[in-house]
C-alpha cells in the first residue's frame, strides 16, 4: 500500500510595539548615559535621565503647586514616546511547519506527526496600547529602595527621604533609587517543536509516544546594575569620589557599599534594569494511552518526563547571569494524569421504580501523581558587603552536597525538618568585608524539591428521565469526592534560612476530603 503524507506550512507576521508613555511623558534613566558621569560632581547632575517628547511643561507639581517647567539641562528628550531608543522590530515573522505521515496508507495502524513554529510574547508593560511600566519613574513619581547600609541615614522620625518629584540631581551621596527601562527593546520569542507517533492497538484503543521541546529567547528579566564592586589597595574603587582625585575606596564594609557602586549617587539596590536577556528551555517525553467509548468506558492515561530550565529570576551575583541558569520554579520531573468516565450498565431489566433507580448511573474520576516543585533556599544574612544588591542563597559547608540537604523518610515524618540544617551542612555566609560583612552563598537556585502530590477525585452520578416541562426532561444527580482518599498533600516548607519556619511545612497544597452534592433539572 502507498503511504500518505501531508505537509502544512504557515507564515505569520506580528507587530508588538514597545510601551508608550501615558499621562504625560514619564521619564527613565539609561545606563549608557549614566556611565558617562559615573562619579557625579558635588553640585549634582541630571545626566542619564530621559523623558518623552510629549512632556507637558505646564504639568503641576502637587508638592509645590507650581508647574514642572521646561525640561532641565542634562535630561535627554527621547525621539519617540517609547521608553526605548529603538522602534518595534518589523521582522517578527512567525513561521509554522507541520506534517502528518501514515505509512502504509489508510489501513495502517501507525501515524506520525510533527511540527515546528515560532511564537512571540508581549512583555507585561509592552504593547500596542498605552501601557506604562510597572515601576515609578520621574518626574511624576519618586521611588525609594533604601535598604541595608543604604538606609543608614533613616531615623524613626524621618524613615523616608523627602518627596520632591521632578528630576532630582544625582550627587555622590544622593542615594537615588532610579529604575531602568531599556534602552533596547526586544520581543520575547519562543520556538516550539514536537514529534509524535500514534499506534492504534485496537479500533478504540491507541498509544501515543512523543517528544516536545521549546526554547525561549529575549525573555524579560530584572537585573540590578549597581551592585557594589569589591575594593582592595591593589584595586581601588571610585577614585575621586569626594572630589580629591587621589582619594579612593580600598576597603569593603557594609557601610561603604553605597560608595563602591558603579554609578555613584544611586543606591546598591537601584538601577534595576528591565531588559530582554532571559532564556528558557524545556524538553519532555510524553506517553498517552487513550480508550474511546468501549462498553461505556472512556479513559486516558498520560505520563510526562520533562525538565524546564531558565534564568529569568536572578540571585546572588547580579553580574553573572550564568549562575542563575537552573530549573524553572514550575518544573515537575514526573507527572502522571489518568481520567475515566464509565457509564455503568443497567443493573436490572425490571421496569417501574426499581428499574428506574438501577439504571443511568455513571462513575468518573481523575488521578494526579506528580513530583514536587523546586525551591530556592535563601539567606538574609548573605550579601551584606554588596548592600543587598542581590538576594543571597544559602552556603553549603565544604564537602556538603544537595543530597546532604535532603532528609529521609515519609513526608509526614519530615514536616518540621524537610531540610538538614545542621552546622556541617549549611554554613554562615562567607565573610568578605573587613567589618565582617558577608558575600553571597554558593547554592544555586531551585536546587531541592518540595513534597510531591498524589490526588484522586471521584464523581458518581445518575441521570433519570422525569418529563415535566418537556417530555424528555432529565433530573441529574451527582455526588463528587475531592481528594477522595483524604491523602495528605503538603505545600513547600519555609525556605528562608535562620527563620523559625525554615524547613517547616505549615500548610497543605490540597484540601482534605470534600464531598459535594448536586441536583439539576435539564429541559
Image (tube, grey):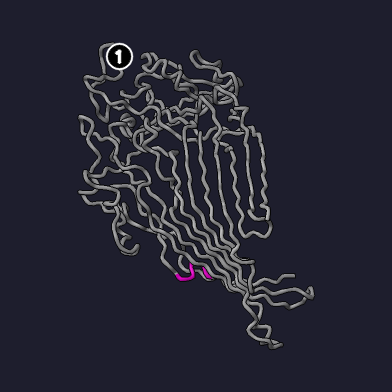
Q: Nearer the viewer, residue 106 or 299?
A: 106
Query: Magenta stretch: residue 356 in it?
Result: no
The image quarter containing residue 192 is top right
Is 310 displayed left or right of 19 in the figure? left
- In the depicted structure, whether residue 67 falls above or below residue 499: above
- Which residue ends up furthest to the top in the rendered image? 245
Pick the front one: 237 or 175: 237
Q: Is residue 124 visible?
A: no
Report the residue that reaches farthest toward the front.
1
Would residue 440 be found to the left or right of residue 100 on screen?
left
Disc 1 packing (10 Å; few <14; some 14–19; many ≥20): some
Q: Measured from the top left, where is residue 272 in percent x and y?
A: 43, 31
Q: Residue 51 occupies which quadrant of the picture?
A: top right
Q: Write the start and end of the magenta stretch as one range.
A: 481-485
Q: Nearer the viewer, residue 121 or 269?
A: 121
Magenta highlight on residue 484: yes
- Residue pictured at 68% horizontal, 53% vertical: 2
Position above or below: 327 against 520: above
Q: Quadrant of the N terminus?
A: bottom right
Q: Which residue is mark 1?
A: 240
Q: Is residue 272 visible?
A: yes
Q: Is residue 153 left or right of residue 85?
A: left
Q: Is residue 485 above or below residue 213?
A: below
Q: Secondary structure at mark 1?
A: loop
Left or right: 376 as drawn, with respect to 116: left
- Residue 304 in percent (x, y) is at 49, 55
Amino acid at each position: 500500500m502507498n503511504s500518505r503524507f501531508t505537509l502544512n506550512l504557515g507564515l505569520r507576521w506580528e507587530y508588538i510595539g514597545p510601551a508608550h508613555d501615558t499621562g504625560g511623558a514619564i521619564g527613565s534613566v539609561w545606563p549608557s548615559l549614566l556611565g558617562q558621569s559615573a562619579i557625579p560632581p558635588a553640585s549634582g547632575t541630571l545626566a542619564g535621565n530621559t523623558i518623552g517628547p510629549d512632556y507637558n511643561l505646564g504639568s503641576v507639581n502637587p508638592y509645590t503647586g507650581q508647574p514642572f517647567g521646561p525640561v532641565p539641562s542634562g535630561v535627554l528628550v527621547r525621539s519617540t514616546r517609547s521608553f526605548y531608543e529603538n522602534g518595534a522590530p518589523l521582522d517578527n515573522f512567525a513561521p509554522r511547519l507541520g506534517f502528518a505521515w501514515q505509512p502504509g496508507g489508510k489501513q495502517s495502524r501507525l501515524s506520525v506527526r510533527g511540527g515546528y513554529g515560532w511564537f512571540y510574547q508581549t512583555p507585561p508593560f509592552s504593547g500596542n496600547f498605552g501601557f506604562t511600566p510597572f515601576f515609578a519613574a520621574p518626574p511624576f513619581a519618586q521611588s525609594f529602595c533604601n535598604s541595608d547600609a543604604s538606609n543608614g541615614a533613616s531615623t524613626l522620625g524621618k524613615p523616608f527621604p523627602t518627596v520632591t518629584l521632578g528630576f532630582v540631581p544625582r550627587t555622590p551621596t544622593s542615594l537615588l533609587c532610579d529604575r531602568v527601562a531599556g534602552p533596547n527593546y526586544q520581543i520575547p520569542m519562543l520556538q516550539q517543536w514536537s514529534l509524535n507517533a500514534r499506534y492504534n492497538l485496537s479500533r478504540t484503543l491507541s498509544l501515543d509516544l512523543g517528544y516536545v521541546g521549546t526554547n525561549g529567547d529575549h525573555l524579560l528579566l530584572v537585573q540590578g546594575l549597581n551592585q557594589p564592586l569589591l575594593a582592595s589597595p591593589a584595586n581601588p574603587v571610585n577614585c575621586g569620589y569626594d572630589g580629591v582625585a587621589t582619594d579612593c575606596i580600598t576597603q569593603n564594609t557594609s557601610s561603604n557599599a553605597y560608595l563602591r557602586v558603579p554609578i555613584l549617587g544611586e543606591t546598591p539596590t537601584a538601577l534595576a534594569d528591565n531588559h530582554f536577556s532571559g532564556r528558557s528551555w524545556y524538553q519532555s517525553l510524553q506517553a498517552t494511552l487513550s480508550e474511546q467509548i468501549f462498553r461505556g468506558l472512556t479513559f486516558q492515561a498520560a505520563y510526562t518526563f520533562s525538565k524546564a530550565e531558565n534564568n529569568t529570576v536572578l540571585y546572588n551575583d547580579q553580574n553573572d547571569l550564568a549562575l542563575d541558569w537552573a530549573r524553572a520554579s514550575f518544573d515537575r520531573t514526573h507527572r502522571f494524569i489518568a481520567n475515566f468516565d464509565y457509564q455503568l450498565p443497567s443493573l436490572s431489566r425490571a421496569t417501574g421504580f426499581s428499574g428506574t433507580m438501577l439504571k443511568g448511573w455513571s462513575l468518573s474520576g481523575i488521578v494526579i501523581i506528580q513530583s514536587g516543585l523546586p525551591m530556592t533556599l535563601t539567606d538574609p544574612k548573605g550579601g551584606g558587603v554588596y548592600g543587598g544588591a542581590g538576594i543571597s542563597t544559602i552556603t553549603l559547608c565544604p564537602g556538603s552536597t544537595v543530597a546532604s540537604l535532603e532528609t529521609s523518610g515519609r513526608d509526614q515524618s519530615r514536616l518540621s525538618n524537610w531540610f538538614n540544617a545542621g552546622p556541617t551542612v549549611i554554613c554562615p555566609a562567607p565573610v568578605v568585608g573587613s567589618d565582617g560583612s558577608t558575600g553571597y552563598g554558593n547554592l544555586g537556585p531551585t536546587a531541592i524539591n518540595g513534597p510531591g502530590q498524589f490526588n484522586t477525585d471521584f464523581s458518581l452520578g445518575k441521570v433519570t428521565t422525569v418529563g415535566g416541562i418537556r417530555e424528555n426532561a432529565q433530573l441529574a444527580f451527582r455526588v463528587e469526592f475531592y481528594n477522595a482518599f483524604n491523602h495528605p498533600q503538603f505545600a513547600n516548607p519555609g525556605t528562608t534560612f535562620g527563620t523559625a519556619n525554615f524547613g517547616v511545612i505549615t500548610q497543605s497544597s490540597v484540601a482534605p476530603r470534600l464531598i459535594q452534592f448536586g441536583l439539576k433539572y435539564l429541559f
